Each structure stands twice: as C-alpha cells, then as structure tokens.
Image (spheres, grey):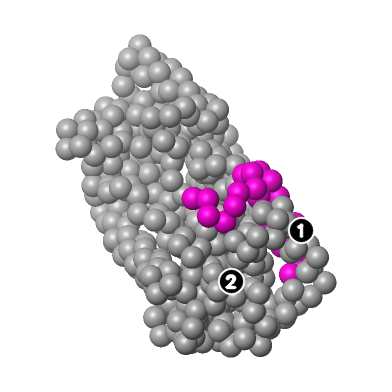
Amino acid sequence: MRAPDASGPLAPAVLAVRGAALLLALVALAHTLVHGLAEPGLALVFGLLVAAGELIRRDAAAGEREPAPLAAAGALAYALLGDSAGRPTTHGALQVIAVVVVGQALAAVPRGACGRRTDAGRAARRTLTVGFAAVCFQPLYHSGQAERWFGDGPWFPLFPLTVLALTALCDAVLAALLARSAARAEGPGALPPYGSLLVDEVRALAGTGTGTGTAIGLTGVVTALGVAVAGPWAPAVLCGPLLLTQVSARRYAAVRTTCRQTMASLARATEIAGYTPPGHARRVAALATAVGRELGLTGPRLTVLEHAALVHDIGQLSLVDPVAGGATALLPAAEQRRIALLGGAVVRRTGAAPEVAAVVERQADPYREQPLAARIVRTVNAYDDLCGEGVGGPLGALEHLRLGTGHDHQPQVVEALGRVLARGGLTPAGAG
C-alpha cells in the first residue's frame, strides 16, 4: 500500500500524527536543553545506535513493516533502560524522546545529501511509540513503583516486557491509522475497514509474514537489561542477531516481490494473446483485494487472493479459440470448470503457493463448495465480465450478480462488492 502523495494534501489522521510527534519532539528538546543531558555517555551511545540504524536502512520493500529495525530496537532499549552497569540512571522520558529525535535527524542529513528520502510518517510514528514506552517505564522505575510490583529479582524483566506489549499495541494502532489514510488517498473504493488493518498490523508485530516486530521488541528489552548489567558496551554485542534478522526479512520480502511480478506477467500473457481485455486481470485483482479486506481478510490470505485474482484467467491459454471478450462468466459451468482446472495446473508449475493454484482451480465450483478467496474471485470476475457485456453498466452487472446469489455467488460477497463499489463510485469495466 503506497503512502499518500507528498505533493498533495495530507489526510487529517496523518496531519494529527505528525503534529503530535512534532509537538512532543519540541517539548522534549526544550526540556533537555534547559535541564541538561543526564548520563551523556549513555545518551551518545543510544543516539548513535538510532542514527546508525537509520543510515543502513533501505527504502521499505513490499510487505516490510520496519525497514530500520536496528534504530527501532535501539530507541526501545533506551526507553526501557533503568540501570547501567548496576547503577541507577537518572534520564527521564523527555530525554529519551529528545535523543531518539536527534538520532533520526542526524541520519536524515547524509541520507538527504545522497538523495534518499526520509519517511516523515515513520519518524513520527517512532517518536510517538518510543515516547509512549518511555512514559510508561521511566516514571514507574524512578519512583520505585516497578520494583515494588515486580521485585528486584528474576521477575523484574516482566515489567519491561509488559511495557513492550503495550507499546506494540500502540504502534499497531498508529500503523493501521496511517495505512487507512494511505488507502483513502488511493481512492474510496480501496478503503479497507480499520479493524482488518489493525489485525494485520498486530500479526505483523507478532512476527508473522515479513514483519520483524517480535525480534525488534525483544532485542530492545534484552539490550536494556544487558546495559543494566554490563554497561554501555552491551548494545554492540546484543544487536548483532537483529541485523541477521533484517537480512532474512529483506530476502523474504524480495521473494514475495518476485512472486507477485511472476503472477502479473502471467496475467499479461492472456491479454497479449488476445484472450482477455486489456487491464482485466489488474482490475479484478484490485477489486478482489478490496472486497477481501471488506470481508476481513488480512496478511497472507489477502496475498493469496491477490495472486489468484491476477492469474484467474490463465487457463484460457489452453483454448483453441478465444472466448468472445474473454468473458468466462458467460460460459457453461462445465467449460468454466475445465478452464479453471487447466489454469490451476499452469499456476502449480510456476512455483507459486499451492493455495493460489487451489483458488484458481476452484473459482468455477458452486460457491458453497469454495473457499472464501475463490468465491471472491468468481464474483469479481463475473462483475468485470458483465460490465463489458452491455447488461446495463455497473448497476446492471451488480443486479445480475444479486439475482445469481441462489447458486452462483455468495450473498455476503456480492454485498461486500456493492459496498466497495458504492464507496468508489460505480465505474465501468474499462476504467483505469
């Protein structure tokens, strides 16, 4: 999902997040300048760690939630830092925010000189989440309340872990809010429910998909506890495994990108051969993904749906003569199933996920026997086919689908399609 266009007006939610982060940063910097820097050595270590993490980051790959995990882990570690080499620290929550902001700003200068754009949204989100963690941890630690609750023994790590869990939830709330604003910038028809985006972000933070959320959070906690025992040298040793995790996550994201490019190339093959109208596969994939989000699909299930929608017509390459207009929805049921099975066989040979091939194979089955993704592909494909067949335009196509809910289409999918179309405006098949 792309970010809102920086050249256009920003969504109110994005402005609110950035404004809150800017205000918090200014207050923290002013407080630190007035009261001075506590433990300047520690502040320097963690500020440089954040700056180094930002410098070695790359532009976010597809599906990558946190492109600078080292910076995120360093910022969290400083927010959750109590002791240093057995001696209590005296820095507070505002100094934590100031050091993180300065570290990000230091990295932005050479990145800007090299022509690499700084993501203001991610910087604002990190400022707010790190501030949340510091506000939850530092006052309770310095007042001794955390020690009274958890003791000073083996149970004390439960305190930073509890703060970490709350911080992860706060970050997921902000990420979902920004993702929905980005979707709104793409157009009303692509606007997913906030709940499904929040679930997606929580799953990513928990470590599913390409997310490194668990590794980042645990590295932050372990680094803070390591500094408490060994002093400022601990981050140099404890952040190494996170760098390996970052490399692995990038490789996985690259594999996902390659897979999607393969699916898109297959979809283009039917258009180039004249079996489907130009843009049909792309329209079906975009609309099917929007309907999937409307019905609560997230993460890998949404990816399977998108890939299957892109290649749902690949079986038509087995036909001697193209179907008029590529409209398989108007063929007899037996012919639709034959084309679907042939398409699934082709997809299996590409190395795509077996789930994608299964959706392609079952898109022509009666909907009561289909998985949800196949039901969505069947309905959205039929809608796009009908729009090009002169059945009364988009409204007529949608009404035709509603008349077929007794056998061909699941009513809930048709109604979800109607809601998505109503938000984006009913557009003809050839649009976009």
**Over which residues does the magenta segment extend?**
409-432
Q: Which residue is mark 1?
A: 399
From the top left corner, tell me how far across and down residue 154 is, in percent.
50, 54
- Residue at x 55% of width, y 62% of height: 284
Q: Is residue 244 above or below residue 57?
A: below
Structural crowding at the residue carrying mark 1, measured as other residues with C-alpha within 10 Å and reported as few (<14), some (14–19) or many (≥20):
some
Residue 310 highlighted magenta (yes or no): no
Q: Depth check: 82 or 166 in front? A: 166
Q: Quadrant of residue 297?
A: bottom right
x 79%, y 68%: residue: 405
Residue 415 sits inside the magenta stretch: yes
- Pointer 2: what residue? 327
Q: Residue at x 43, y 77 (%)?
A: 352
Observer able to see residue 6: yes
Q: Where 214 sits versus 190, above or below?
A: below
* Badge 1 amino acid: Glu
- In the rendered image, which quarter is residue 247 located in? bottom left
Residue at the image point whose x is 38% and y is 14% from the top:
30
